[in-house]
Image (tube, grey):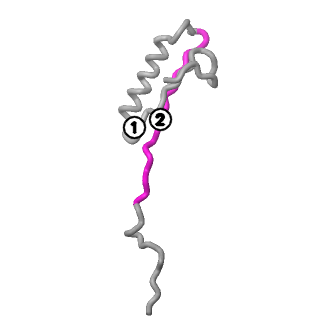
Amino acid sequence: MARTSRKSSKAERSAPVFRENRWASYARLSVKSNKVGIDDSIIHQLQRNRDFIRKNIQDGLLAGEYYDDGISGTTFAGVR
């Protein structure tokens, strides 16, 4: 009697599952032009980032928006 393989054939193996890419947007306002609260500049930067991602990246998801209102590049003032 012939031996049979216990391994599944290539046809029986499941196809790999690909995850959707996740993207984040970041905007920063410099200390010199910093005003009280969220400046219009930050809102415009985030909108431009959203538009860019929407137009140029088809296989992704905008997972978050981060902004830094003139503090530093490492301390986030807010997360949207």
Residue at position x 63%, y 20% from top?
Answer: 72
Residue at position x 47%, y 74% from top?
Answer: 7
Classify the position of the N terminus by image quarter. Answer: bottom left
Magenta range: 15-32
Residue at which label 2 appears: 23
Residue at which label 1 appears: 57
- Near mark 1 (Cα within 10 A), the count class, few <14, some 14-19 or many ≥20, is few
- Near mark 2 (Cα within 10 A), the count class, few <14, some 14-19 or many ≥20, is few
Per the image, label 2 sits on a secondary structure element best described as strand
Instruction: Please check the rendered image and state whether residue 40 is part of the magenta-colored stretch, yes or no.
Output: no
Q: Quadrant of residue 31?
A: top right
Of tags 1 and 2, the one toward the viewer is: 2
Residue 24 is situated, as x and y percent measured from the top left of the image, at 49, 32
Q: Are marks 1 and 2 in contact (CB under 8 Å)?
A: yes
Hey, what amino acid is under mark 2?
A: Trp
- Residue 76 image label: none
Per the image, label 1 sits on a secondary structure element best described as loop
Residue 58 is situated, as x and y percent measured from the top left of the image, at 37, 39
Residue at position x 45%, y 42% from top?
Answer: 21
Residue at position x 43%, y 44% from top?
Answer: 20
Horizontal relation, residue 7 to residue 56: left or right: right
- CA gap between label 1 and label 2 equals 9 Å
76 over 34 or under it: above or below: below
Horizontal relation, residue 33 to residue 10: left or right: right
Instruction: Please check the rendered image and state whether residue 29 is part of the magenta-colored stretch, yes or no.
Output: yes
Residue 38 is situated, as x and y percent measured from the top left of the image, at 51, 12
- Number of numbered markers: 2
Residue 17 is situated, as x and y percent measured from the top left of the image, at 43, 53
Q: Quadrant of residue 55?
A: top left
Hey, what amino acid is under mark 1?
A: Ile
**First in sequence: mark 1 vs mark 2:** 2
11 over 59 or under it: above or below: below
